Amino acid sequence: MEYILAFINQHIELIYIVILSVFLGVEVISRVPSVLHTPLMSGANAIHGVVIIGAIIVMGKADPENYLALFIGFLAVMLGTVNVVGGFVVTDRMLEMFKGKKK
Amino acid sequence: MIGSSVLSIIYLIGSVTFILGLKMLSRPGTARNGNLVAAGGMLAAILGTIFLYRVDDQPLHNYGWIFTALVIGTVIGVLAAKKVKMTAMPEMVSLFNGMGGACAALISIVEFSHHSAMDGMVVIMLLSLIIGAVSCAGSIIAYGKLAGKIKDFAFNGQHIVNLFVLGLIVILSVLLFTGISPTILFYSVCLLSIIYGVLFVLPIGGADMPVVISLLNSFTGVAAACGGFLYNNPVMLTGGILVGSAGTILTILMCKAMNRSLKNVLIGSFGGSSTAGGSTGEQGHYKEISLADTAVVLAYANKVIIVPGYGLAVAQAQHAVHELEKLLEDRGVTVKYAIHPVAGRMPGHMNVLLAEADVPYEKLLEMEDANNELATADAVLILGANDVVNPAAKTNPASPIYGMPILEVENAKAVIVNKRSMKPGYAGIENELFFQPKTSMLFGDAKKVLQDLTASIKEV
């Protein structure tokens, strides 16, 4: 229990960000026309690829002799990159099709 | 010192671009730019981290490894995203999502391996591990199912087993804090989470897959946000939580459209029961209609409403249907499309497909408008849709899809259903619509049938 209390105290600012972001996410999304649901899901999918930053940090601070950590980190960075790059490119492809027909 | 202040500002800008990006993505006019804005923010955050991040005042190292991984990942990502067919988009998104989940779980594994104290950070690592692993395993199963590589699989007491696995994950996680062999417990939790992810998605029928992908998408968001706590990193936190809450809202919207409760989704029980309880066993009589007759019905109608479904997507018939629509319009027939929110495999799937074929926006009717207009239509042409037009959703309380809003096609003067065979739809239940006197069946692959129809109408 004290772990949790100490944790909350140490990270109170981050917790505020979490709570505000939850409401922000709800506000932003609830006004989306259903036409855009698939591209939106895909775009959101690319955004959570931000987890790659954690992978880069893991990789960048790993001991160059620790091959296991390097290998896992390598895998993590690679998978994260596929998530980010693939996600944004696929979303762009979908939205490209919406563009032409507005004229 | 300057470097880390600059990095903080880059993270701030990154967070703002994610919010702006999502906001712009929610409007048709700005959507594409919104995606680019978010991508730009992401690029800045990634490059900033690589060059400016400091651990105990030391820059990051292993640049060779990092850049190799980035290049390989970029090549795979671009190739996969460029090559995928529009119809296979849902499974692609699912696969990308699984990779994000795997990334989060792997980060946890490495961090745990050199973390000695038992503190709040371990809770975060466990959360990130569990959510990431569930999301990854679940997404891969969802991908396999949508790609037709994995069949539906359910056994009796499935959700009891699921709950048991979930309980075990929680118990082992709590035990971990007693400090007795934490490493073994940590890896056991990882393994169990993968098993849970598999069990969770395996029994769910394809009709419910949009809900699952959207839910797993928000899971990965939360896992990414855990990384924000681990590294005290605001951009990971905002990005992750935004996706987490946005994905949850999207999931709830989808659940509402299908009359499911989110609780049922989480226990992983819904698809299994629908295969078991739905079939009435009684086939009844249906009548077939020839291509030539269909051509006449459509050509001499005042108003035709087309209901596209997954069959259209599978057959890649979006261009063929647009050809037919243009031809009918030239003959003075009003043609519109009735779009059910969960037609296809993802919400908005049909809109994306029809957009690809340059079908104008104003021809697409959302469900409510469609139901108002269906009564005035002379003919409804259903292309590979099934559950979304099944009247059992309104009339049969025993049906697993009872209560789901449907397109009320039986109000139109005539209904023509194009399917490949009489096989039930994805929910695995019979559709009494096919046996009604108003309904005629036109069997065949949607694309072939549409092309032949277009040719026949030209001759009428």
Image: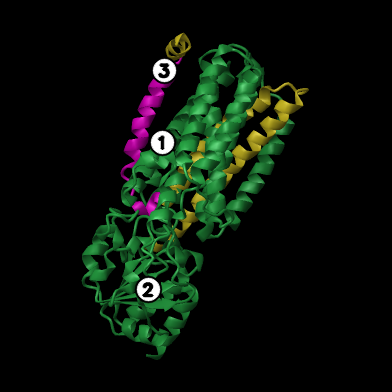
- Give the quadrant of residue B439: bottom left
Q: With B443 as the anchor, is B329 left or right in this view?
A: left
> At label 2, which amino acid type do we have?
Val
Circle 2 Cα neighbour tier, 10 Å, few/some/many (<14 / 14–19 / ≥20): many
Residue B249 visible in the displayed image? no
Q: Disc 1 versus disc 3: distance between alpha carbons?
A: 19 Å
Q: Which chain is green?
A: B
* Pointer 1 and pointer 3 on the same chain: no
Q: Is residue A70 above or below residue B378?
A: above
> At label 1, which amino acid type do we have?
Ile
Which chain is mark 3 on?
A: A
Q: Which mark is residue A13?
A: 3
* Pointer 2 and pointer 1 on the same chain: yes
The prevailing secondary structure element of the residues shown in magenta is helix
Q: Which residue is under mark 2?
A: B417
> At label 3, which amino acid type do we have?
Glu
Secondary structure of the residue carrying numbered label 2: strand
Q: Which residue is under mark 1?
A: B19
